[in-house]
Amino acid sequence: MRADFVAGGVFLAFVSLTLAITIAAARRPKSIAAFYAAEGKVSGVGNGLAIAGDFISAATLLGLTGLAFSFGGDMLFFAVGTTVGWALVLFLIAEPLRGMGRYTFAEAVASRLSEGPIRLFAALGVLIVSIPYLVAQIVGAGALVETLFGVDYRLGVIAAGVLLITYVVIGGMIAATWIQIVKASLLIGGGTALAILTLAAFDFDVNRLVHAAELVHPLGDRLLAPGAYFADVWSAFSLGLSLALGLAGFPHLMMRFFTVRTVGDARMSALIAIAINAAFMLVVFIIGIGAVSLLNGRTEFLDQSGGLIGGANMVAIHLSAALGGPMFYGFIAAVAFATILAVVAGLALAVASAVSHDLYARYFRRGAASLTAELLVSRIAVVAVGVAMVLLGFVFEGRNVAALAALATAIAACVNFPVLALAIHWRGLTTWGAVAGGGAGLVLATGAIVLGPEVWTAVLGHSEPIFPYAYPTILALPCALLVAIGVSLMDASALGRAERTRAEAVQ
Amino acid sequence: MTASTSARKTSTLGVVLSVVLLGAYFALIVAAMAAPDILAIKLPEAGGVTVLVAIALLLLALTTLASLIYMLFAPREGDAP
């Protein structure tokens, strides 16, 4: 435990700032549009910052620096995959999505298909996709608090859960968006400063930085060569598919395209997010590789077994202490914690909207629910999500943050992406095709993950996984697409025929 | 130009850029698995980083550039004739 008072003070100041934003947001006029979509009043640049803030989460700042630190060059497959994924969202998804719906992913898809079954499926998809991503963030929060204050991991998990509920229940989407904008700006600034300090430690000589890392890393001069992380080409290919296509399936990211007023703003949002994402990946790579030599032999950062305190996920945090002193360490740790809270708040809001808006108000009450009742159900859902997240955070203690987040991305690529992409770009999609395809992706993706190495062996303790690959996308995504297309083509129901006729007429 | 024509052009440019970027990304993955030693070659004139790092950074820059091209040149759905 080090620099507790300084780090704690900075941390409390930052959390107080975000709570003040939340309270200010709560004073604004209440409406469903404000709670879910910030009344469509966020600017394109501001929304781009918020989207980048949503994606530059614990998995990026903590997980990817850890991957670069441990596996060197293979981290770049994550970096390029997510950036390309953002570009695909801009080129193929963002604008039509903005024009299709109002608040939620389900609403966008349901705008051209039968509302009932689609809302039920989409809400289920949102829940399934969000859970592993929430768990990834909360595991990062627990490890961070454990490292920062030397307290029990579970305390950090509980604190994150309580703050999450406070943010979302009081402030809704407006608060979540403004917290993301503030946090993203500070995180980008802090991360860039840390990368500059890292380069400065080597007199801005990249050759020296690389050589120093290779001298002490177990991979030696293969540190920046490919092959340390991936066991085979299929695993690499499956992860690539997940990262490139999964972003479009994340409800908390896609939901942000409803918070801007025009299609042009949606396009600007995506462009800003891509530029920030690409630049921050370079920052993360420099931090991860630089830390290899800069943290080597620094016993104050090591635990009794010789590993980093808090594991490889804490590389950026330790490096900030090594290079910037207590104040900078406290700042980076506080921003990292706020990052987790803000991302979790956005996810919880997406889950809440799926439960209260799609399931309760539109599916069960057929649009007859009052505003008060819908907001009440939404807030109950947020509390339930917070409690479930804390309990799952206990179960998954010690798991790699980036790996957990990648699993969530894989599920998003297999469940939500096929339905959304076909709904936007294929006139032949019918309601039953969408439900069958998305359902096939859901069953195959979750089944393969449960039977795969991340859960079957790592969590459940079996010696060998039944499904050999960590990421199910290479199997589940093509199956989901084929089933959706096949069922739609064979759909001879009156509903299917009407949907095809309507789509042709619109075109 | 009608709104629907404009929308089709947006889609065509988006699809072309998507295919190019996805193709480059998966080509890098396949190359990393099929010929790792080539991607492990060091480039002293580029700070001692490997071919893998250089190509990955190039792809990051190209992706941002492609997004800017789309932003500037793709007609918006619903643009006036």
Image: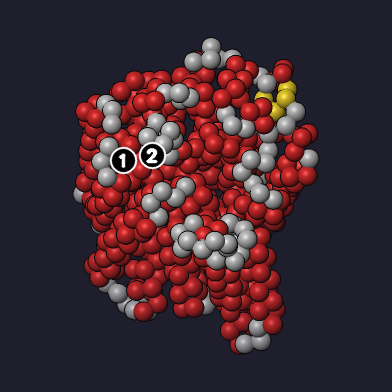
Q: In this view, does A434 lie above or below A327?
A: below
Please tell me how crowded label 2 is: few (under 14), some (14-19), or many (20+) other residues with Cα within 10 Å: many
Could you tell me residue A430's position as x and y percent? 61, 76
Q: Residue A310 carries which label?
A: 2
Contact? badges 2 and 1 (CB < 8 Å): yes
Furthest-top residue in view? Answer: A203
Residue for point 38% across, 73% down: A359
| Label 1 sits on residue | A146
Is disc 1 placed on a helix, strand or loop? helix
In this rendering, does residue A483 appear at all? yes
**A435 or B1: which is nearer to us?**
A435
Q: In this view, does A487 lie above or below A418?
A: below
Residue type (three-letter) at the residue carrying disc 1: Glu
Q: In this view, does A314 lie above or below A325?
A: below
On screen, residue A309 versus residue A151, left or right, reads right
On screen, residue A447 versus residue A308, left or right, reads right
Could you tell me residue B78's position as x and y percent? 60, 54
Residue for point 47% across, 61% down: A461
Residue for point 54% across, 69% down: A447
On screen, residue A227 versus residue A102, left or right, reads right
Is disc 2 placed on a helix, strand or loop? loop
Give whichever of discs 2 and 1 has the lower sequence position. 1
